[in-house]
Amino acid sequence: MTVKKVSLSFVRQITGSGQPIPGNNHGGIVMDERTALIALNMVPGLGSVRIKRLIAYCGSAENVFSAGAAELKAVEGIGAEISRSILYFDDFYSVDGELENAAKKMSRYLPSMTTAIRRT
């Protein structure tokens, strides 16, 4: 049996849900604070100021992705369009790719940094 991963948007489309599916698994990516911060930076229309406001209001970057539309729209600068972008964000595969790229870069630079520190 072949299992195909589909986007959350597709699942919402076929289930007819107008809101994000409660308890979704974020595309199979484990959601922690770091992952949530990277994801927020990938949401169209969000910059550093809006992200800081969202985190201040919701308590954490993780909580932003658990918030409902009304909660998100209560944050200054977050209207219907941006709240929809957050609620329907489903590009967690790109977030995972960013984490993998960062890990590769760290493994490449960490040995040379350690050697340089030892020499001083």
Image: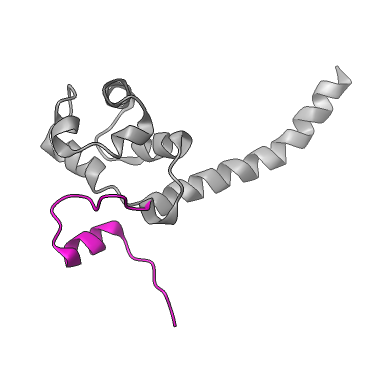
Q: Which of the 4 image quarters holds residue 109? A: top right
Give the quarter of the figure containing the C terminus.
top right
Residue 114 location (% of width, % of height): 79, 29
Q: Which SS does the magenta portion mostly show? A: loop
Residue 93 location (% of width, % of height): 43, 54
x 53%, y 44%: residue: 99
Color theme of the render: one colour
Q: Is residue 105 left or right of residue 68?
A: right
Please name whichever residue, 118 or 90, is drawn nearer the observer in this view of the structure: 90
Please name whichever residue, 80 or 119, is drawn nearer the observer in this view of the structure: 80
Is residue 8 inside the magenta stretch? yes
x 30%, y 34%: residue: 64
Residue 23 location (% of width, % of height): 31, 50
x 17%, y 21%: residue: 76
Outermost residue, top side: 120
Q: Which residues are magenta?
A: 1-25
Residue 33's place in the image compared with 12, above or below, is: above
Outermost residue, bottom side: 1
Please name whichever residue, 10 or 47, is drawn nearer the observer in this view of the structure: 10
Give the quarter of the figure containing the N terminus.
bottom left
Is residue 31 inside the magenta stretch? no
